Amino acid sequence: MFSKTCEYAIKASIYIASQSLAQKRVGIKDIAQAIESPEAFTGKIMQVLSKNHVVASVKGPHGGFEILESAMKEKKLAEVVRAMDGDDIFKSCGLGLKECSGANPCPLHNQFAKIRADITKLLETTTLYDVATGLADGLTFLKR
Amino acid sequence: MFSKTCEYAIKASIYIASQSLAQKRVGIKDIAQAIESPEAFTGKIMQVLSKNHVVASVKGPHGGFEILESAMKEKKLAEVVRAMDGDDIFKSCGLGLKECSGANPCPLHNQFAKIRADITKLLETTTLYDVATGLADGLTFLKR
DNA sequence: ACAATAAAAGACTTTTTTATCTTTTATTAA
DNA sequence: TTAATAAAAGATAAAAAAGTCTTTTATTGT
């Protein structure tokens, strides 16, 4: 579904958002712990998220990553996914056809159209805030 | 969604099924052409499909691959997918958690449960016959 | 029996993804 | 203004996925 990189990115974003709700800025080490990802690789991912303005980064002592509450209420999961995996998951054919469409449909075109639409709707409507609250409240988890 | 290998496998299976409907046994070269896949790699994939009894293979002159009409009416797409990618797509967590469940849910557990169920239903109910007919009738395509 | 055909099997190679290590840049506080 | 901290950037490395090439085995028609 998502690349591993993208899974880490989503989890990291949600974790940072939940910590930001408690006014806590978090560092790479902390993030890597929280989402069980390799630390250095997590750093790389954070660079991408930061460049794509999914999270804000602050260098130096007491630095780290954060997402303003106002921002996380706007940021959709789709933006995180696009930053890492592009928009393949939103657009591309389930069987890998380059020009799969109503005019040139693969054998599963219609069936997949529905599934893709559901995935798109989920990712385009869910904000980081939406999912961060559940984590902050201990209702959902990023490990195991 | 699926690995490239699995995409090829699904397309190859559908192509073989549609040709079998016309009593035509097809070889690797033919299959590779029909689904725009690398020939040698297609051979490897056919070995797996053959071992998993998705298709029947015949060696020697006039050999190739085929699927009996009675068999293709039983074979679900899910069996092709399982043969190539295992059952990750049916089971695994969207965010990669190993023990994602109602008791230890990832932040997207419920949302993904629905999507996974839809994918599973599609793959578990659609037979090769169902999709082969559309291809045989020129209504669907495996290229471009 | 033998030549031709076609898949199976095995050993490799290439590419992509995932992951690490080192150096540089920015920020802070003493 | 310097030492400490933490992310950014760059260069590699390891693992997995995708793809190729060569040899072997099975089948068929002559």
Image (spheres, coloured by chain):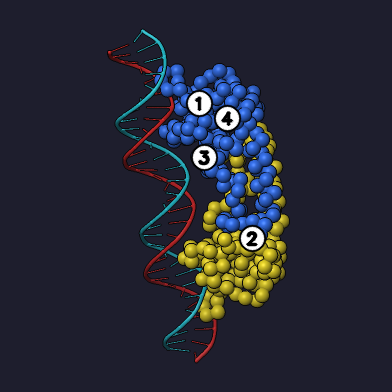
Chain colours: A blue, B yellow, C cyan, D red
Of tags 1 and 2, the one toward the viewer is 2
Please give the residue where the numbered disc 1 appears in the rendered image. A56
Q: Position of residue B142 (x, y in %)?
A: 60, 63
Q: Which of the two discs, 1 and 2, labels the residue nearer the N terminus?
A: 1
Residue A104's label in the rendered image is 2
Image-based side of A101 in relation to D16, left or right: right
> Going 48% across and 63% down the picture, which residue do you hit?
B38
Task: Give the chain of mark 3.
Answer: A
> Going 60% across and 27% down the picture, which residue do you hit?
A72
Instruction: Assess disc 4: are there few (<14), some (14-19) or many (≥20) residues with their C-alpha within 10 Å of its C-alpha.
Output: many
Q: Position of residue C7 (x, y in %)?
A: 52, 71
Quadrant position of residue A134: top right
Instruction: Assess disc 3: are there few (<14), some (14-19) or many (≥20) residues with their C-alpha within 10 Å of its C-alpha.
Output: many
> Going 65% across and 34% down the picture, which residue do you hit?
A126
Q: What amino acid type is highlighted by mark number 2?
A: Asn
Badges 2 and 3, same chain: yes
Q: Is residue A65 above or below residue C6?
A: above
Q: Which of the two discs, 1 and 4, labels the residue nearer the N terminus?
A: 4
Mark 2 → mark 3, Cα distance in angstroms: 29 Å
Badges 1 and 3, same chain: yes
Q: Is residue A95 above or below residue B17?
A: above
Of tags 3 and 4, the one toward the viewer is 3
Image-based side of A75 in relation to D11, left or right: right
Q: Position of residue A1 (x, y in %)?
A: 58, 45
Residue A14's label in the rendered image is 4
